[in-house]
Amino acid sequence: MANPPSLKRTIVVRLILPLIVFIFIETILSYYIALHYVNLTYDRWLLDSAYSLAQEVKKDGNKISVELPDAALEIFTWDNIDSTFFKIISETSGLLKSNQPTLKTMALAPGSKQPVFSDSFINGKTIRMVSIQTSKNLPENVSIHVAETLNKRRLMTFEILLADLIPQFLLTLLISTYLFKGVSRGLRPLNRLSKEISKRSPNDLNPIPESHVFAEVKILTDTINTLLDKLSSAITAQQRFIANAAHQLRTPLAGLKLQAERAQREKNIDNIQPALFQIQKSADKTSHIIAQLLVLARSGPIEGTHNFELIDLQSLAKEVSMEWVPNALKKNIELSFESANLSVLIYGDPILLTELINNLLDNAIKYGKKNGNIVVKLFDQPVPTFIIEDDGPGIENTEYDRVFERFYRIPGSTGNGCGLGLAIVKEIANLHQARLLAGQASFGGFRVELQFEE
């Protein structure tokens, strides 16, 4: 597996790379600017040399002569770096004077007064040449051409460029070092955070301290702390679920074992029947508790994932209510359904909402009075609302909140419930962010109301 990219290296490279590109572009610009001014300087010197030679062109009667002694010629052409060439040409007489007769020159327009600069070659070397024309006090036009090789120009351009590049290189090196150290110091909180997390035990879910943490790193620590808080809540809920499940299953399982031992001791088949009846009763209770615990686990934070979809609560509630009609009829209870709307649309989990309605109807039938009434109401104004009322004995006002606690049963309650039905209702309501209200029914019994968000 390839190593992940280094954040430090990435930051430094992204900061240094633009600087290097800038220096590269600036170096190219500096080269051409330096070359321009070097050429301008030496072109002026070359032009001065041409004008100096023009002063030596004299009129000798009807002829033109060049008075250039050998000593002066030696001084004119002396240069320990470059080679200097000249050529003086008369319009009619032709070549008057030259130290390099093979020097190729360009023809000037008659009467031209502007100097002309050009590049050429001689003996395989590049040269720079200036050409001027003079006719002052002379019977004809005389062209003077002076050229030199480019060694001094190149040397000076290199020296100027080097003088510009050395400080830039040192500055880049200094900035790079500073950036690398600065980024290293800036990433220290992340290193400390990594070491602190690595030293933690798996059971330590306390929030990560946020002292001496930069704002950018605080975003990360806040996210981790939020995750730790959710994980802690899920683990706490799971531990509570396991403890409650163990507590609730212990009694029916102990009863099963006791009745099984009793049945084994009996010799007469008739005496075994009561034990078998108690075994069946304990098994039914155990099965009911397990089913309720599984629903409770699915509706709580242990599962953590629920697929909500747009459902018709009216259709769902009516269908579930019809399934409970036979159970209600066994106690001569009239189960009615009231809804003024054709449909009440909400977002939710249809399986969990079915279980919620099942638990409420089971609770109403189980604890309602015989020959009584249970009413299921549903409406969507001002918010989608689901109500179940019965005309049973009801409960005291002080018990309204406690009946939704897990495994809590009101003292003196009839039936063999396990105290999970309304706890499941509360968990599912919380999952759907529905408001759960308990109170007294309009005809004296118990009333449960759920208000869903629009």
Image: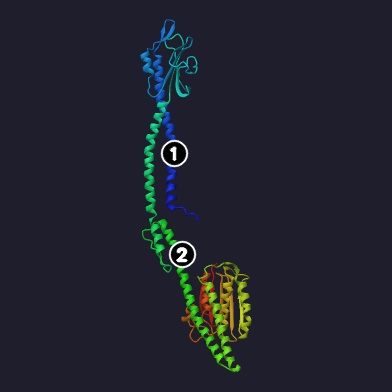
Which residue is most to the top? Answer: 61
Identify which residue is drawn at 45% across, 38% down.
Answer: 25
The answer to whether marks 1 and 2 mark residues whose Cβ atoms lie closer than 8 Å is: no
Distance Cα–Cα, label 1 vs label 2: 48 Å
Badge 1 local density, few (<14 within 10 Å), some, or many (20+)?
few
* x then y, percent, for residue 126: 46, 24
Residue 274, picture quadrant? bottom right
Q: Nearer the viewer, residue 367 or 143?
A: 143
The colour scheme used here is rainbow
Q: Nearer the viewer, residue 217 or 406?
A: 217
Residue 154, picture quadrant? top left
Residue at disc 2, secondary structure: helix
Badge 2 local density, few (<14 within 10 Å), some, or many (20+)?
some
* x then y, percent, for residue 448: 53, 77
Residue 167, picture quadrant? top left
Identify which residue is drawn at 43% across, 59% down.
Answer: 220
Amino acid, disc 2: Leu
Residue at disc 1, secondary structure: helix
* x then y, percent, for residue 217: 41, 57
* Residue 22 in view here: yes
Amino acid, disc 1: Phe
* x then y, percent, for residue 300: 51, 72
* Residue 363 in view here: no
Q: Nearer the viewer, residue 32 or 437?
A: 32
Of badges 1 and 2, nearer the viewer stands: 1
Q: What label sits on residue 24 in the rendered view?
A: 1
Find disc 2 in the rendering and name its residue.
Answer: 227
Q: Quadrant of the C terminus?
A: bottom right
Q: What label sits on residue 103 in the rendered view?
A: none
Residue 36 against residue 99 in the figure, above or below: below
Residue 356 against residue 219 in the figure, above or below: below
